[in-house]
Image (tube, rainbow, N blue to C red):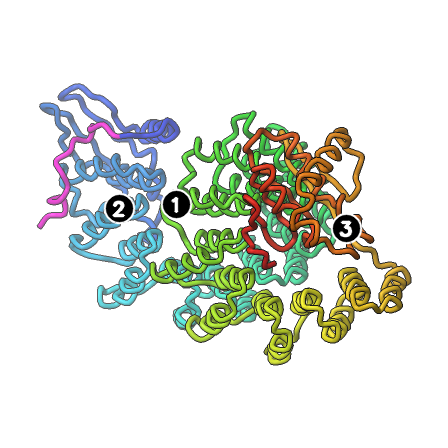
Amino acid sequence: MPAIALIPNICLYKPFSLSSARFVKYQALLQRCNFPVVREPGQQVPLMNDCMVFAEMPERTGIGVSTNLRGAGTWENGGFVRSDLDTSHLISVLKFCGGEGCVDLGRSYHGLIAKIGLDGDEFVNTSLVDMYAKCGDIDSAVMVFNQMPSLDVASCNCLVSGYANCGLFDEAFRLFMEYESLGNKPNPYTYSTMLAICGFLSALEEGKQLHAQVVKMQYLSETAVSNALLTMYCKCGAMKDAESVFERLPHRNIISWTAIINGLYQHEDFEKAMRQFCLMRESEIEPNEYTFTIALACCGSMKNVDSSRLLHALVIKKGMALGEFVGAAIIDMYSELGETDDAKKQFKEMGNLASKVSRNALIKGLVQNEKGNEALDVFSEMVRKDDACDEFTFSTILRACASLPSFTSCQQIHAWIAKANLDTNTHVGSSLIEAYTGCGSVEDAEKVFSRISAPDVVSWNSMIKAYSQNGNPRRAMSLFRRMIIKGFRPTGFTFLGVLSACSHSGKIQDGQEIFQSMIREFGILPEQAHYSCMVDLLGRSGQIEKALDFISNMPIKPTASIWRPLLAACRCHKNLKVAELVAKYILAMDPNDATVYVTLSNMYTEAGLLENAENQRKLMKLKKVTKEPGCSWIEVNNKMHKFFSRDRTHPKSEKIYDKLKQVAVLIKGTAYSTNADPQQVKEDSCLYHSEKLAVCFGLISLPAGKPVRIFKNLRVCTDCHMFMKFASMITDRVIVLSDNYRFHHFNKGCCSCGDYW
C-alpha cells in the first residue's frame, strides 16, 4: 500500500491554525526559501535553493538528510505539477513544522509530497517521520516509517527519538534492539538518545550495557556521547561512575562541566560541586546561565553568605544577574540563607524584567522564612498588575495563609483560584486543603477535596490530616480505608495522620493494628514522628509502663521528640517517678527545654514537694532558661490581633475585660467554677489567660453567629478549655481554638476532642 493511502486528499493551501508568532516564522521561512504563496495558472514557479539546511553536508548522517536537486514547477488548472522539485525545500519546511509543532501544515506538505510523487524518497520520508514524531503524532510517524521501502540509521534514529519524546520508552528500546535486523548499526546519535532514556528512567543496568557498547564502538571520543553517558550516571545516582567518566573525557565543554556540577548538586555534595565550578573557570570555560543557576543553588544550600555574595558579584560582572532564571536563582539563594532583604533587593533591581518565575521565587522565600504577611503583599502586587499566577504561585501563597494562619486571605485566594479555573487542580487543591486545615475549617477542606478532579496520595493525606487535627478520628480512619480500596498506596505521611487520629481519640487497639500494618503490609519503616505518635497513644491512655517498654524496644535511638509526649502523659496521670526519669533523658539532649523544668515544678507542687519545685525554678534561672510566654491571636477585619496574659495594650482593652467579666458572671456557679487548677490560678492568673482575652475580643468584634477562631502558641490549659466550652454554650457561638497540638471546636458546651487531649 502506498505511504499516502491513509492521508486524506488535502490541498497544499488548506487552511490551518498557526499562532501569530509561528506565522511570522513561517512567512520568513517561505521568503528565505522563495516558496510561492499564490501563483497564476501556468506561471513558472522558480524554487531557488536559498535555504539549503542540509545541502552543505557531504553525506547523509544519522540526524538529517540532504540532496542538491534544483528545479521548478507550474500551476495548471488550479494544481501544482512537479518539475524536478527541490527536495531540500520540502525537508526544510518539514523541519520547521517539527520544530514549531505545526502538524497541520506538515500534513498539508505530506499531501503535496504524495501528489508530486516524492513519497518514495527516503530523505523526504525520514523528514516526515521526524516531523510527525516532534509534533507528538507518533502514530503517523510509525505509519510512514513502516511503509518506507528502505530504512537506514537516520530514519530509525528519528523514530527512536520520537518514541522517547512521547514517553514510549519500551517501544524505543524495542526498536533499538532491531537495528541490526533492519541492516543498520547504531551511530553516536543513537547512543546519545538511548543514554538519555536510561537517565530519565534511572535504568542504571541498561545504561551500563550501553556504556560497554559505546566503548566497543569507540564512540567515547564523541563529545555528545560522552556527555550523554555522564548525564545518565548523574541521573541514576551513580556519582562515582559519573566522576570516573568525567575524569576520562578527552574533551570537556560547557555541557560536560555543567552535567557533573548538576549531578553533585542533586546528590547534595555542594562543596564538591563548587570545587568543580571553580575548576571549570580555571579551565577557561566560562559558565552559562544554567551553570550559574546551579552554582547559586549550591551556595544557598551551603549556607555560606560570603561565598554567595562573591558569586553574586561574578554574575553581575558577567551581565546575567537580571536574567529570568539566574535572577530567580539569586532570590532563591538569599532566601535559603535567610537574607530576605537581599532577596527583595534583587527582585526590585530586576524591575520590569521581573517575571512570574522571580515573583514565585520571592513568595516562596518569604514563606520559607516565616514572613507570610510580606508574601501576601507580593502576591497582592502580582494580582494588581494582572500578572499570571500559576499553580506554583497559588500553592506557595496558600502555605502563607496556613502559617499565619489567615482564614480571610485563604478565602480570597480561593476565589482567585476559582477565577483561574484551577480549583480542580490536584496540587492547588491539596494546598487549599492544607490551608483550610491550618485555619481550622474542616468543612471548607471537605468541599475542596470533593472538587479535585483526580486526587492523588497527597490530596488524600491532606484530608486525613484535616480530620485528624480537627477532632474527626472516625472520618480520618474511614477515609484511610477508602484510599486503600481505591488502589492508592499509603505513604509515611498517611500513617502519621491516621496514627495521630488514633492518639487524639484514645483508640489504642486501632492505632497498634495500623502501626503493625504499616510495617508488615506496606513495608514502610517508621520514622521518629510515627514512634512519637505511638508513645503519645499509649501514654495519654495511662499505659505509662507500656510506653516505656515501647521506647526501649525501638530499633532507633529515642530522641527528645519521642520522650516529650511521655512526659506530658506523666503530668496528666500524675506519675512523678517516671516523669523524673523522662526529664533526665530530654534534658540530656536539649538542656534548654523550658517545658521540662516547668512540668516538673508543677508536678512537685501538686505532690506537696515545694522545695523540689523551687529548685526547678532556681535551675531555670541559673541556666538562663526562659519559658516562652503564652500568646494568642485572632484575625478580625483582615488584621491580626495578638494578646498575652493580663494584656492591656490593645486599644479595646476596657471593652475586652468588661466582656470577660460578663461571660465569667454568666458561667459562675456552673461546673466550670469547680474545675480551675488552683496552682495555675496562683501562678498564671488563668482568668486572664491570652486565649480568653482573644475570644472576648472576637465576641465583641465579629458579627453575630460568625465563628470565633483563636490560635495559641502553647497547649491550652484545663481551665481555659472548660471556659471555652461554657462560653460557646452561653454565647451560642462556635469557638475554634488551635493550640500547638491540635484544634478544639467548641459548640453548645461540647468540644470536638471529647475532653481527651
Closer to the camera, 376 or 679? 679
Instruction: Kindly indicate the quadrant of the structure image that contains residue 103.
Output: top left
Is label 1 in contact with label 3 (beta carbons under 8 Å)?
no
Q: Three-letter amino acid code at disc 2? A: Asp
* Residue 5 % position (x, y): 11, 44
Local SS, label 3: helix
Residue beneath disc 2: 137
Q: Earlier in the sequence, mark 1 or mark 2?
A: 2
Distance (Cα) linking label 1 and label 2? 35 Å
Q: Three-letter amino acid code at disc 1? A: Ser
Residue beneath disc 3: 306
Instruction: Name which residue lies at 75% across and 35% down.
Output: 657
Q: Quadrant of the C terminus?
A: bottom right
Is label 2 in contact with label 3 (beta carbons under 8 Å)?
no
Nearer the camera: disc 1 or disc 3: 1
**Where 234 falls versus 291 (above or below)?**
below
Residue 500 visible from this viewpoint: yes
Residue beneath disc 1: 450
Is residue 368 left or right of 199 when viewed as pictured? Answer: right
Q: Where does the magenta region start and end?
A: 1-16
Residue 299 colored in magenta in the image: no
Local SS, label 1: helix
* Residue 397 % position (x, y): 56, 40
Distance (Cα) linking label 1 and label 3? 49 Å
Label 3 packing within 10 angstroms: few (<14), some (14-19), many (20+): few
Q: Three-letter amino acid code at disc 3? A: Asp
Q: Earlier in the sequence, mark 1 or mark 3?
A: 3
Q: Residue furthest top?
A: 40
Instruction: Name which residue lies at 52% across and 72% down.
Output: 525
